[in-house]
Image (cartoon, rainbow, N blue to C red):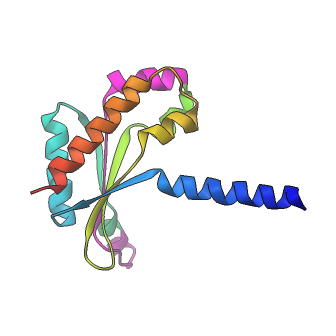
Amino acid sequence: MRFVYAALFLLVASLTTRAESLIKIESQHGVKQTVDRLAAAIEKRGIKIAARIDHAAATKAADLELAPTGLVIFGNPKLGTPLMQEGPTMGIDLPMKILTWQDNSGKVWMTFPDPEDLEFRHGVKTHDEIFAKMRKALDGLTQAAGGQ
């Protein structure tokens, strides 16, 4: 019986950790303006944007509604390639992405995966400096997009 409780505890703990692996930053702007500011900040830093997806617009085509929600996918092969060379499954999480969305109260948020979680999830152990650069870049981009 102790084994069952221990297994259940580990399962709940792992689910909690997964939920906490997303970083959520509030924006002072609407979703469209935040996404536009984010794209401009990305391009200003010389980073390539792979895609911009307007989830809310896509739902309208299916006669459904979704609060404003946009995704920007972007990356820097000089940072991502060494990570994928060590852990090919990193390709499921790269290029990086920032989701911008509006909650039920009207607040706008930017959400992205914590690079430390990616390091752990994919077993990449020799590139701490790259993950630190990724986190610094993500923090800077969301600050530029969501701030005054």
Name the residue rendered at 21%, 42% in the picture: 140
Q: Nearer the viewer, residue 85 or 15?
A: 15
Residue 3, image x, y percentages: 86, 55
| Residue 134 at x, y percent in the picture | 34, 34
Report how many numbered discs are placed on residues in the image. 0
Q: Which quadrant would residue 81 be assigned to in this image?
A: top left
Give the percent coordinates (x, y) of residue 82. Answer: 44, 20
Identify which residue is drawn at 42% across, 39% down: 115
Location of residue 77 with respect to 34 vertically, above or below: above
Position of the C terminus by quadrant? bottom left
With 41 as the anchor, is 129 left or right in this view? right
- The residue sitting at 18% across, 67% down in the picture is 30
For residue 144, above or below residue 28: above
Q: Is residue 21 left or right of residue 137?
A: right
> Is residue 116 in the magenta section?
no
Query: Which residue is found at the position 18% from the left and 56% from the top?
Result: 146
State the residue in front, 79 or 22. 22
* Image: 25 above or below 47: below
Magenta segment boundaries in residue numbering: 59-86
Q: Position of residue 138 (x, y in %)?
A: 29, 42
**Residue 72 is covered by the magenta coloring:** yes
Residue 58 placement: quadrant: bottom left
Residue reaching furthest right? 1
